[in-house]
Image (cartoon, rainbow, N blue to C red):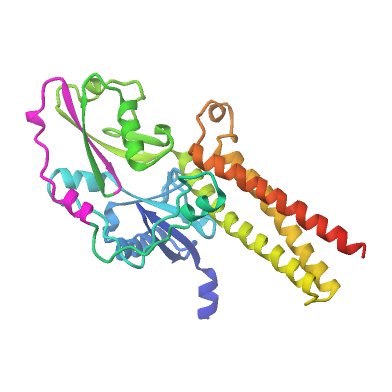
């Protein structure tokens, strides 16, 4: 009976900033969302009433406009955001703003940002799953206790932009003549994103256009609070970057497997039949990896979708795309090498 109940449960991963948690839930249970939020509260310390679970840009919930828990695919990823109730409680002083405590059980999410153009460098960047320190970093502590800015002290032509992403807050001072796009550009650089178009700013429940002046948004106020969300396509990018990390690991394994087979054949450690079988496996794997790398390359370069997507900028950094192109070439070379060896030794 317990095994049957276990089979009915579905796994997923919740991502909150740089923290992740693997959870289980019963997709057909009417209380599935409540159960998930209770587990999230235990892992991240966020009260259920302040949580917003998002899958591919849509909130997970029981309402008709939401994504139903039963429709979530197995092993999918949800983004944890703070909802309007949380920010309202912060404004009224009922809840004190806090920052995620990095627990040693939570690992940093892998990123596809690289500093070099080699596949090894890209792999190292994507595999940065280092254990987080049990105590918050000094920078987090300093930010948490930084005194609030008194907006009344600002010049008449300046405005304080208070941005909230999850439990992280960012304060920037801009001229009232600046645009919403200027804010997104600055924040995207801080967050290490390749394009400001990956971000969406929500102010009083609305998303102003990029060309909207901050003075028009603030009106008579000297400060503006806004929530920072990821565009729906950015969630797809995060999934593709995770696929890329796994493919690079598989590519390295296949490269090592080919070298091992070559060494065994040179020393006659295995029979010809066994060697040919291993070469066939390497060939199949390399062809699959090359094809999947090309698909990821297509997505991360903004090549999929309709006309709106075609006009968008590349959705991954230039360094990532350059290293990805080199990985595609490596996979093709591996395929060619395995094919030649297989043909050579099949004819013997």
- Tell me, yes or no, if residue 316 can be seen here: no
Q: Where is residue 68 in the image (x, y as percent from the top left)?
A: 47, 52
Q: In this rendering, is residue 174 above or below 319?
A: above
Q: Which residue is drawn at 89% across and 63% down?
A: 346
- Tell me, yes or no, if residue 211 can be seen here: yes
Question: From the viewer's perspective, is 273 left or right of 35?
Answer: right
Q: Position of residue 335 (x, y in %)?
A: 74, 53
Asked if the stretch drawn in magenta spans residue 290, the answer is no
Q: In this rendering, is residue 321 above or below 30?
A: above
Residue farthest toward the left in the current orientation of the protein: 153
Residue 35's quadrant in the figure?
bottom left
Residue farthest toward the front in the current orientation of the protein: 267
Nearer-the-camera pick, 329 or 199: 329
Q: Magenta segment, which residues?
A: 138-166
Q: Residue at x 35, y 65 (%)?
A: 39
Residue farthest toward the bottom in the current orientation of the protein: 1
Q: Which residue is drawn at 70% across and 64% down?
A: 259
Question: From the viewer's perspective, is 185 left or right of 122?
Answer: left
Q: Where is residue 311 in the image (x, y as percent from the top left)?
A: 53, 25
Question: From the viewer's perspective, is 313 left or right of 331?
Answer: left
Residue 285's quadrant in the figure?
bottom right
Residue 162's quadrant in the figure?
top left
Q: In this rendering, is residue 34 above or below 166?
A: below
Image quadrant in which the C terminus is located: bottom right
Asked if the stretch drawn in magenta spans residue 154, the answer is yes
Q: Where is residue 343 in the image (x, y as percent from the top left)?
A: 87, 58
Nearer-the-camera pick, 226 or 28: 226
Count of numbered labels shown in the rendering: 0
Q: Which residue is drawn at 78% across and 74% down?
A: 267
């Amino acid at each position: 009976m317990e095994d049957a109940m276990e089979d009915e449960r579905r796994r997923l991963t919740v991502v909150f900033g740089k923290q992740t948690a693997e959870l289980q839930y019963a997709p057909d249970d009417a209380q599935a969302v409540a159960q998930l939020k209770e587990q999230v509260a235990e892992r991240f310390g966020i009260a259920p009433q302040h949580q917003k679970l998002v899958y591919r840009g849509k909130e997970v919930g029981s309402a008709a406009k939401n994504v139903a828990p039963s429709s979530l695919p197995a092993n999918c990823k949800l983004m944890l955001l703070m909802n309007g109730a949380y920010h309202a409680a912060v404004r009224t002083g009922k809840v004190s703003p806090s920052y995620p405590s990095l627990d040693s059980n939570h690992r940093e999410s892998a990123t596809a940002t690289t500093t070099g153009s080699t596949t090894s460098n890209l792999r190292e960047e994507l595999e940065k799953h280092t254990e987080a320190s049990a105590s918050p970093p000094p920078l987090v502590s300093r930010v948490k206790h930084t005194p609030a800015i008194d907006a009344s002290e600002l010049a008449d032509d300046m405005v304080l932009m208070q941005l909230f992403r999850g439990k992280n807050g960012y304060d920037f001072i801009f001229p009232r003549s600046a645009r919403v796009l200027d804010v997104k550009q600055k924040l995207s650089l801080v967050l290490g994103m390749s394009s400001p178009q990956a971000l969406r700013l929500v102010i009083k429940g609305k998303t102003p256009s990029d060309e909207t002046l901050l003075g028009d948004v603030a009106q008579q106020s000297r400060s503006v609070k806004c929530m920072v969300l990821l565009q729906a396509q950015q969630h797809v990018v995060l999934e593709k970057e995770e696929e890329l990390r796994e493919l690079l690991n598989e590519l390295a394994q296949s490269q090592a497997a080919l070298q091992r087979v070559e060494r065994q054949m040179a020393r006659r450690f295995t029979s010809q039949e066994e060697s040919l079988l291993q070469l066939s496996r390497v060939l199949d794997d390399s062809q699959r990896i090359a094809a999947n790398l090309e698909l990821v390359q297509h997505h991360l370069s903004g090549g999929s979708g309709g006309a709106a997507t075609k006009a968008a900028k590349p959705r991954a950094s230039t360094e990532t795309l350059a290293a990805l192109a080199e990985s595609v070439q490596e996979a093709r070379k591996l395929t060619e090498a395995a094919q030649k060896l297989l043909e050579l030794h099949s004819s013997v």
